[in-house]
Image (cartoon, rainbow, N blue to C red):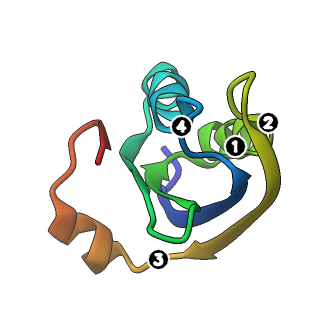
């Protein structure tokens, strides 16, 4: 089996107050992705994920669309260190 990838996404736009994090959880659960989504003070949503490449690619496509009321203007991503993610001890997808 291929190695899992760990990525942090910062989603910008009208993404708070529109069930963005809950939608992300539904998609992540369907794709067997672990991680979390949380609102940031500046109005962005931070999403940290761990999963197989095919699942993360599909998940990222959803991040650009989001739920019906969202208006996503940008999705930035960065690969994160395995040690950082493992320290979080996430075994599913959480909403913070």
Observer-side mark, 1 or 3, equals 1
Name the residue beneath numbered marker 3: 80
Give the SS element for disc 4.
Answer: loop
For the residues labelled 1 and 4, say whether their Cβ atoms are less than 8 Å apart. Answer: no
Q: Point out the tag, 1 or 4, that comes first from the N-terminus.
A: 4
Is tag 4's residue or tag 2's residue first in the polypeptide sequence?
4
Which mark lies nearer to you, 4 or 2?
4
Check disc 2 and report its element: helix, strand or loop. helix
Give me the residue at 54% from left, 71% from top: 42
Task: Give x and y (percent) for residue 63.
Answer: 69, 43
Comparing labels 1 and 4, the label whose residue is closer to the camera: 4
Q: Where is mark 4, residue-wise?
A: 17
CA–CA distance in space, label 1 to label 2: 5 Å
Q: Is residue 86 left or right of residue 73?
A: left
Q: Is residue 18 above or below residue 39?
A: above
Q: Position of residue 17 (x, y in %)?
A: 53, 37
- Sequence order check, earlier mark of 1 and 3: 1
The part of the image, by quadrant, that contains residue 54 is top right
Which residue, given by chain and number where applicable, does mark 1 sit on? 63
- Residue highlighted by disc 2: 65
- Sequence-wise, the earlier of marks 3 and 4 is 4
Mark 2, Cα crowd under 10 Å, few <14 / some 14-19 / many 20+, is: some
Q: Residue visible at 79% across and 48% down? A: 72
């Amino acid at each position: 089996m291929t190695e899992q990838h760990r990525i942090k996404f910062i989603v910008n736009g009208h993404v708070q107050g529109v069930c963005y994090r809950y939608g992300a959880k539904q998609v992540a659960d369907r794709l067997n992705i672990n991680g979390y989504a949380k609102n940031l003070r500046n109005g962005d949503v931070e999403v940290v994920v761990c999963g197989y490449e095919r699942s993360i690619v599909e998940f990222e496509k959803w991040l650009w669309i989001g739920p019906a009321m969202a208006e996503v203007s940008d999705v930035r991503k960065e690969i994160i260190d395995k040690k950082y993610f493992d320290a979080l001890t996430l075994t599913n997808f959480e909403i913070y």
